[in-house]
Amino acid sequence: MRHPSNVAVRLADYRPADFLIDTVALDISLHRTETKVVARLALRRNPKGAPGAPLVLDGDELTLVGVKVDGRPLGAQDYTATPDQLTLTAVPEAPFTLEIETRVDPTANTQLSGLYRSGSAYCTQCEAEGFRRITYFLDRPDVLSVYTTRIDADKSEAPILLSNGNPGETGDLPGGRHYAVWRDPFPKPSYLFALVGGDLGVVRDHFKTTSGRQVTLAIHVEHGKEARAEYAMDALKRSMRWDEEKFGREYDLDVFNIVAVSDFNMGAMENKGLNIFNDKYVLASPETATDVDYAGIEAVIAHEYFHNWTGNRITCRDWFQLCLKEGLTVFRDQEFSADMRSRAVERIGDVRGLRLAQFPEDAGPLAHPVRPEVYHEINNFYTATVYEKGAEIVRMLRTLIGDDCFRRGMDIYFERFDGTAATVEDFLSCFAEASGRDLSHFALWYSQAGTPVLSTEGSYDQNAKTFALTLRQEIAPTPGQQEKKPAVIPVALALFGQNGEKLDLESADARPDELARGLFELSDSTRTVTFKNIPSQPVVSALRGFSAPVRLEPAPASADLEKLLACDDDPFNRWQAAQSLALRAIFARVDAARAGAPLPSAPGYVAALRTILSGADADPAFAAQALSLPSETDLAREAGSNVDPDELFAARFGLLEEIGRALASEAEAIYARLSEASPYSPDAASAGRRSLKTVALDLVAAGDPAKGSALAESQFAAAGNMTDRLAALALLALLGGDAREKAFAAFYAQFEGDALVIDKWFALQATIPEPATTQRVIDLMSHPDFSLSNPNRVRSLIGVFANANLTRFHALDGSGYDLLTKIILELDPKNPQVAARLLSSLRSWRTMEPRRRALIEARLRRIVAQEGLSADTKDIATRALA
Ligand code: 0A1
Ligand code: ZN
């Protein structure tokens, strides 16, 4: 164990390192169980450190072989070493060289942090604290060093040897071994170190930067999968061009390597010049990947590439500043995807993601500020709050100061902080300078947890022709933060007249730029703006484009929502209007069912959907989003308390049937029209048509399950691409019967051996909303293709069951919770990071109705009491229970 879980690390305790490491020369001899690591570190005292302090280096499960200072071997009296620490009490005052030799066992490394094996390849994952599992080091992001890495390995086992930076010498060695040297001229923190050794196929390409630098691009994948890396390569080149055009950022090395591995804890990692990816975010072909997979690859390739500037050239001073690289880089990858695809649809997708993952986090026991102030286990802070809410803060900043000031601020940031380990304050100072604005109040977004609730209240004065709009904000307490202060909320607003016309905004209560931009700043608890010359009671379109990560409550009256759906020129709010109408219709059914009253129908909502369906051809991707009901998870979050998944499922399903019956002929016509065969292309427009086709098919099935099943069966059999095939299989999974089992069997037979596709097969079976599913999941865990050691398998089967199958996971007999508990306790000793993440699926347990709440609490208590529990899982369980 690295640090016991009861030791808190606090932002307030930050001190500069006592030593600096200017250069690192690594000599690594790869071996399956005994890899030899020799590290030569050029050390000197940090003038900002504590004078006379001993040299204390971090380790984690290391075996020390020897230590030398300036070439002289140290005796046992000169240092103390444990697997997690190396301390030298007497070190030279002048700069010196420290040579450390360690042994590590990559085969035994099931945590997938440090040096490990994925298949037959060797690879590393060093963020956040994995480098200390390779050698003793000052493993903190503010110690930047220039690295030279020499790797040697058995040539037949690992013909490819990669590390950060540019390639240097290579050569053969006796005994069938060979070596390669890599030099990275850019100082970097240890978490960006990477190494790969293996027998891999490669796709190569080139990119010429604006200033004329020729860069060799290479994507390394399993032999035989090279063609599946082509889309990733295309996405990489587009990312490189985009960063030049939009942010003036050029690539800075001669080579850019990407390696896809199948065992990876997260999505991918931005190691300097050597990105290592979960192969799920590299490999795609029309036969094996869906449109969603293609979009995911494009986004993750871009994200990791963009880190080269936001994360690598400018890194974080400490892990509390994680959002400095992650929030900013997510913002950049979202902007990239918006430019590559439909901006409106991208925004809707990003907000759906935020509400799905971040809002529940912010509303529950794991809530934390975007820049946390304390942690027990940093790996548990790679959260939706740090990433997605972090991105929303950057977006709000741009909204508030405007595009030009934002770009100027980014230029200052790149110029001033290049080569440094920076803080959130450093970042904000650039925008304060560029805009001339005091951003100290805005900075509260980084330190205050919780989602503000924004409400609007309008009052129309017929005689004066004025409309007084009051904006209010409130933030509920979160763990450790009882008192909340009002945040700075940019509220994008428009008013529409009764005929749908957009009204000019005139008011004495707002700045001219606010009126011109339709952007009003709410920085106190309330603000009233009285608009003049308003001919009649207007319809308010608030929080347009989701201008701030807040909950807008209550939603406007249904009549206003129907108007907005028809006339709002902000596509996000048109989509939001449809969602709000759906939520209202579903909760009306829930209330009626609880009261034993007849279930209400939703004619207004159905009529709105009919209009969307009839105009769907104009923007199929948008229509597909607007026609989709909120998910069960959305409903649970919106309910907020006393959640009974069975009630929510029944109400949602009932409404879907009503819609399906009402819109049967329209849905069938659209489905037929969009089913005309055309060659697969992953572009956004084609993907949009396929998503509308899927929505149409689901509607047909909702109204007439037999017809839906027949259509799904023939779509499944005839599908020329994975998007269509999987959509059909998902529908058959829901509809059940023989057709379902036949389709699952056929799918498996067709894709057996293709792990990423079999993950989809696992995932869909885990979503079946029927009592037999829990046993099915248990049985699938014994399937030869399932493995608890592979994070993708665990996420596909268990993660999907726990996060996306609400009725079965939350079964009243506790069977779903028992299954999760058993798996977490079995997985925890092997891979604590993945176990802890899986446990986060219980984070909203207090919102459940009392019986389920009690069942979950008992399981959480059992987990926390488990002897030898990892720091990762213990941290989540403890905070969840607090
Ligand atoms: N920095 C990577 C994600 C990442 C984070 C942590 C990891 O191990 C604990 C691994 C990868 C990114 O943002 O893409
Ligand atoms: Zn990132």
Image (tube, rainbow, N blue to C red):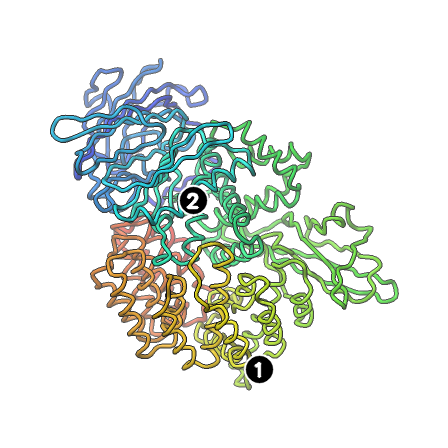
Residue at the far left: name it.
175
Q: Residue at x 59, y 59 (%)?
A: 551
Asked whether the viewer can see residue 14, the reply is no
Q: Is mark 2 within 8 Å of ligand 1?
A: no
Classify the position of the C terminus by image quarter: bottom left
| Direction from residue 344 to residue 787 in the image, left or right | left
Query: For the residue marked with disc 1, what is the amino acid?
Result: Pro
Q: Earlier in the sequence, mark 2 or mark 1?
A: 2
> Residue 792, percent across and down?
32, 54
| Direction from residue 571 to residue 236 in the image, left or right | left
Q: Quadrant of residue 802?
A: bottom left
Residue at the far top: name it.
94
Residue placed most toward the observer, 637 or 777: 777
Q: Which mark is residue 600?
A: 1
Q: Quadrant of residue 473?
A: bottom right
What residue is disc 2 on? 234
Q: Secondary structure at mark 1?
A: loop
Residue placed most toward the observer, 780 or 814: 780
Residue placed most toward the observer, 711 or 778: 711
- Density class for disc 1 (Cα within 10 Å; few <14, some 14-19, many ≥20) is some
| Direction from residue 792 to residue 440 in the image, left or right | right
| Direction from residue 737 to residue 568 in the image, left or right | right
- Density class for disc 2 (Cα within 10 Å; few <14, some 14-19, many ≥20) is few
> Residue 602, percent across and down?
59, 78
Query: For the residue marked with disc 2, what is the amino acid?
Result: Asp
Q: Spatial distance from mark 2 to mark 1, Cα to Cα?
A: 50 Å
Q: Residue at x 57, y 82 (%)?
A: 600
Residue placed most toward the observer, 788 or 254: 254
Residue at the far right: name it.
463
Q: Nearer the viewer, mark 2 or mark 1?
A: 2
Asked if the residues shown at circle 2 and circle 1 are in contact, with their CB atoms under 8 angstroms apart, the answer is: no
